[in-house]
Image (cartoon, grey):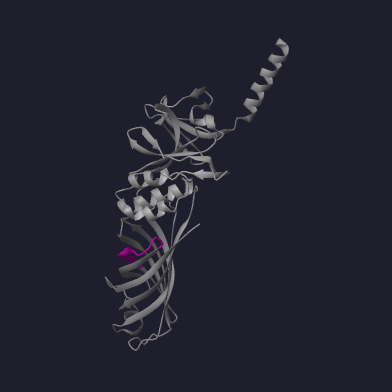
Amino acid sequence: MRKIITVFLLLYFVSTLSAQTFRSGFVVTTKFDTIRGALAFNNEVADYKIIHFKNAKIDTIFTPLSIQGYNLKTGERFVSRNVMENGVQLPIFAQYLVKGEKSLYSYKPLNDEVFAYGVDGDRIRPIPYSKEIKDIDGRDYFVESKYHVGFLKFFFKDCPEVFPMIDRMDKPRRKSLIYLTDKYHDLTCGENSCVIYTKKNYPIRMLVTPSFMIDGNSAGSSATGSSTYLYLAGCQVAFWLPNESERFYVKTGYFVTFDTSNSPLVNRACQIPLMIEYVFTSKLFMPKVSVGSNFQFIDSNFEMHIQAGAGCFIRMTEKLCLDLNISTDIPLLGGDAKFLHNYVAQAGVCYRIEF
């Protein structure tokens, strides 16, 4: 009998070790030192109580509050927090989903994921939710509570604009809670004022902006010798990597002249800008500055200008905004080398695309 038990325990131990999946990452000590290595993370119930860490020098088990937390190379971040469960304060590793004025966490005390918000210090409060089977008129029905609606409305009482989103939640879900928390920070603190740890490693965002442009003096000065205006229409595209920077954009576009009685250069000029832009994020008005090159083609003439400008995004909806810009050019190749040689006013409506 003893041999059978020994063999069973040995097989259990081996199967447990083989089931562990070690992932690259690091732990942060209570002194905020970083130790890199591998973590046995399986996204299971036990992971919120302990974490197995090892590298060339260390092979140990960490518990909550013995370290600040740990990060996985894939982007997930876990921190030591205290949560109230059945009237008892329990230290856990909670996954950081959104970091901001109101931080969102998740953990797994059972097989179902529980979501919580930070209240003060290292304490977090779970969002109340329950489901049970009730006997109604002799038949069993699966009933889900609505306690989470009242909890969320009280927690976000300083921003009633998000209440319609809360009313539509049939239960706390990861995607909807992340979106709700992000939206709250956009409305109260300005866009991109929180950090979402569940983003893709390198998502790309793009702004597509159909625009109208008035270009004063440059074409007339170099091609006809007299001051004139060009009226151009086209499209501008801006790209940026949100995980690298939410403020730096790279933008380009294509603009062509269209028929006006003021310009002798109808349908004979086009511009291709290539700029770097810095945006000051805020709730409604987002000022910006830009610098780069502007390539102009007028008849058979080619001009390369150094361009600098300033402007503002005015938020209209979540993905639509008004784009206003003013800029000036200095010719670098071709054209007349006059200071403040070119004046440009531009207006358009931009649409944000994420992929």
Quarter-of-image position of residue 125: top left
Q: Is residue 141 left or right of residue 97?
A: right
The percent coordinates of residue 354 (x first, y second) are 48, 58
Magenta stretch contains residue 43 = no
Above or below, comparing residue 99 to residue 272 in the picture: above
Q: Is residue 346 above or below residue 114?
A: below
- Which residue appears farthest toward the bottom when viewing the image? 261
Q: Nearer the viewer, residue 79 or 226?
A: 79
Find the residue positioned furthest to the top.
Answer: 2
Estimate the x, y position of residue 56 in percent, counting from the top left. Answer: 54, 25
User: Can the viewer see residue 191?
Assistant: no
Q: Assign the magenta stretch its main secondary structure.
A: strand
Determine which quarter of the picture holds residue 219: bottom left
From the viewer's perspective, is 106 left or right of 260?
right
Judge by depth and name the residue closer to the eye, 144 or 108: 144
Quadrant location of the N terminus? top right
Residue shown at the point (54%, 44%) measured from the top left: 142
* Residue 86 visible: yes
Task: Provide residue 139's location: percent of width, then percent of height.
Answer: 58, 44
Q: Quadrant of residue 261?
A: bottom left
x, y percent for residue 226: 29, 84
Magenta residues span 306-319
The answer to if 310 sits in the magenta stretch is yes
Across the whole image, how many numbered discs are drawn on residues?
Answer: 0
User: Which residue is found at the position 69% from the left and 14% from the top?
Assistant: 5
Determine the residue located farthest toward the left in the rendered image: 339
Q: Nearer the viewer, residue 98 or 36?
A: 98
Q: Residue at x 50, y 41 (%)?
A: 131
